[in-house]
Amino acid sequence: MDAKLQSVFDGVVRRNPGEAEFHQAVAEVFESLAPVLARNPQYAEGAVLQRMCEPERQIIFRVPWQDDQGQIHINRGFRVEFNSALGPYKGGLRFHPSVYLGIIKFLGFEQIFKNSLTGMPIGGGKGGSDFDPRGRSDAEIMRFCQSFMTELYRHIGEYTDVPAGDIGVGGREIGYLFGQYKRITNRHESGVITGKGLNWGGSRARTEATGYGAVMFTEEMLKTRSDDLDGRRVVVSGSGNVAIYATEKAQQLGAKVVACSDSSGWIVDEAGIDLELLKEIKEIQRGRISEYADRRSSARFESEGTIWSVPCDVALPCATQNELNAADAKQLVENKVIAVAEGANMPCTPEAVAIFQEAGVLFGPGKAANAGGVATSALEMQQNASRDVWSFEYAEERLHQIMIGVHRRCAQTAEEYGAPGNYVLGANVAGFIKVADAMIAQGLI
Ligand code: NDP
Ligand code: 2IT
């Protein structure tokens, strides 16, 4: 890292001790910025980097709730409102036991640049809780969401901060959260949250958007080498919202998806994933991935080893941060992977990214490749603001055009900065410049 950037980075580490994921996300952006600072002295003069690394506001709150047996639990709630230079804070809520401030800050920081890249008027934020939804009844989930929103409601709003889903937060949770917001405020303020149900303000194609978008981005990367997904072998990690719809779009484009996973292990199905079965197990029954192998003879379940040992042309990590390390990357390169796109946020470690780039593998970083989800959230806000309802085909076409735009912005910026094909640099620099210029134009904020 360049010396000036290193000194700002050291300050960030000192000010935010013990937040390894946040440090990792900041370092990854800073690694790309030396040429930008060299060409634009106003950014250093305006202390733009230092300001960007300090969230505009951080809220931490108690979330008490009662389980079905009457026992009381206390969780911790977070909302980090990171940057509003381009629009209201926008970003999901994650409910997972691993959540702490460092995870929310890494996600919120990434969200600033991702949202900028979409070209939509949205700032960056993220929230969540260390609540573990797994194994909880619908009634418990509802009580938790109601308690969470009883504090969160005063901090959010259509023009202020607009949450959505992330790990552990899907359509069911968004419903309970929105219901409580409406009850407390007496406002049917559709634009306060996205990922809503289709008959009460949700956008068609939002459920599909992140996974579809990641595959659309992959297709754009492949096009630069006159290639496409047709007939390609694909491995997708995870089996949640992003993984399922990445699988669906990859299949629509003629690829064969042969493996997916959850936190207990992975399955390989050489006949190709049966998506209806996967959806039934994961979306309806909220079951485990091992059940897929129990119900399909062409599949086997593994609880040891790694899904990245399955040979493939295209790898789509769609589960969680740092799920693909250097050894996994080496194995994928040995198996002749041609493209990797991050459906999840920061799933590849920095060492893994370096291995892909050195091997000439097309690599799409999360802030570009998974931007389709938040972009379609912005389309949902647009429909809510105009009290309109678009068709699936129209919403999907808008998403497609946005992903083509995200890819073009990354590719052009990488080229402009002398690193053609480096989507990491392209995404970081293009995302950064737009936010930095807006911050300078808006005075000392
Ligand atoms: P879901 O909760 O729907 O699914 C998460 C999947 O990842 C599950 O299969 C889960 O397995 C697995 N997983 C989660 N944590 C771990 C872990 N620590 N170790 C191993 N596996 C794990 O979440 P999403 O699909 O929405 O999110 C997946 C990723 O995509 C996240 O990184 C998220 O930030 C990112 N993302 C999501 C967007 C969205 O619109 N939803 C938009 C952009 C990015 P298990 O059920 O066993 O925990
Ligand atoms: O990481 C992400 O971009 C999301 N979880 C989606 C955020 C959103 O506001 O739709």
Image: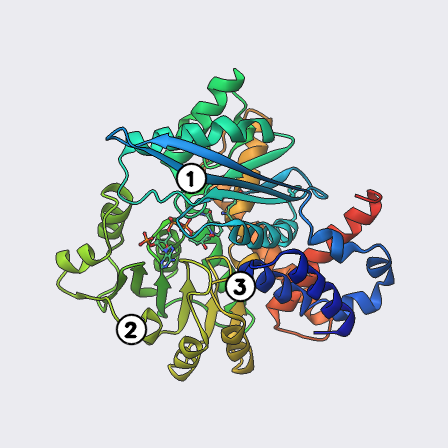
In contact (CB < 8 Å): disc 3 and disc 2: no
Nearer mark to the viewer, of 1 and 2: 1
Which residue appears at 51% of the width and 55% of the height? 370
In the rendered image, residue 303, in percent from the top left (x then y), is placed at 24, 66
Disc 1 C-beta below 8 A from ligand 1: no
Q: Is residue 398 visible?
A: no
Please report whichever mark, 1 or 2, sits nearer to the chain's N-terminal start. 1
Occupied quadrant, residue 189: top right
In the rendered image, residue 292, in percent from the top left (x then y), is placed at 20, 56
- Which three-letter amino acid code belongs to the residue tagged 1? Asn
Residue position for label 1: 75
Which residue appears at 40% of the width and 84% of the height? 334
In the rendered image, residue 88, in percent from the top left (x then y), is placed at 65, 37
Q: CA distance from mark 1 to mark 2?
A: 33 Å
Occupied quadrant, residue 243: bottom left
Q: CA distance from mark 3 to mark 1?
A: 42 Å
Q: CA distance from mark 3 to mark 2?
A: 31 Å
Q: Nearer the viewer, residue 180 or 50?
A: 50
In the rendered image, residue 417, in percent from the top left (x then y), is placed at 73, 71
- Which three-letter amino acid code belongs to the residue tagged 2? Gly
Residue position for label 3: 220
**Quarter containing the N terminus:** bottom right
Disc 3 C-beta below 8 A from ligand 1: no
